[in-house]
């Protein structure tokens, strides 16, 4: 079965950095677009970044210049490097594989990122 396991979240001070990882299994990783979403308390889940099978990346406007999405197909892992973190980046970050080659979206369990001094 499809599994997405996020890691790397935690508490970081404003201006700091974190790298999130998402280990994938149960599907052909290399042909699928992968994405990171986040959901802050009381807000809707929103796209942070996505990366295609070919390595092309797209970012939410709020993240451009501050984060980098990447993938290692050999390790079946997608990463999100986040820099210059702000308190408003505080959220649960979710790994996603969108419907396409798979019959539906799949989500990880999420990893909490808290930006606070």
Image (cartoon, rainbow, N blue to C red):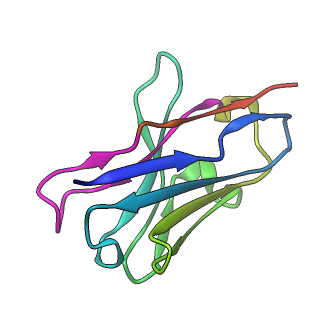
* Residue interval drawn in magenta: 90-108
The residue at 86%/34% (across/down) is 13
Residue 11 in the image: x percent, y percent? 76, 32
Q: How many marks?
A: 0
* Residue 35: quarter of image: bottom left
Q: Is residue 72 magenta?
A: no
Residue 2 in the image: x percent, y percent? 26, 54
Most foreground residue, 88 or 75? 75
Q: Is residue 106 magenta?
A: yes
Left/right of residue 88 with respect to residue 33 in the rendered view: right
Quarter containing the N terminus = bottom left
Residue 81 in the image: x percent, y percent? 67, 58
The residue at 79%/49% (across/down) is 17
Left/right of residue 61 with respect to residue 35 in the rendered view: right
The residue at 58%/46% (across/down) is 7
Q: Classify 34 as above or below 94.
A: below
Residue 57 in the image: x percent, y percent? 49, 71
* Residue 14: quarter of image: top right
Q: Classify 97 as above or below 13.
A: below
Quarter containing the C terminus = top right
């Amino acid at each position: 079965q499809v599994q997405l396991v996020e890691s790397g979240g935690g508490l970081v001070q404003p201006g700091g950095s974190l790298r999130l990882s998402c280990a994938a299994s149960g599907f052909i990783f290399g042909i699928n677009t992968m994405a990171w979403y986040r959901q802050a308390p009381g807000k809707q889940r929103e796209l942070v970044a996505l990366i295609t099978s070919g390595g092309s990346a797209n970012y939410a406007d709020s993240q451009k210049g501050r984060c980098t999405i990447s993938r290692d197909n050999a390790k079946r892992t997608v990463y999100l490097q986040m820099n210059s973190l702000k308190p408003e980046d505080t959220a649960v970050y979710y790994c996603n594989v969108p419907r396409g080659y798979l019959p539906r979206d799949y989500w990880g369990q999420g990893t909490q990122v808290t930006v606070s001094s």
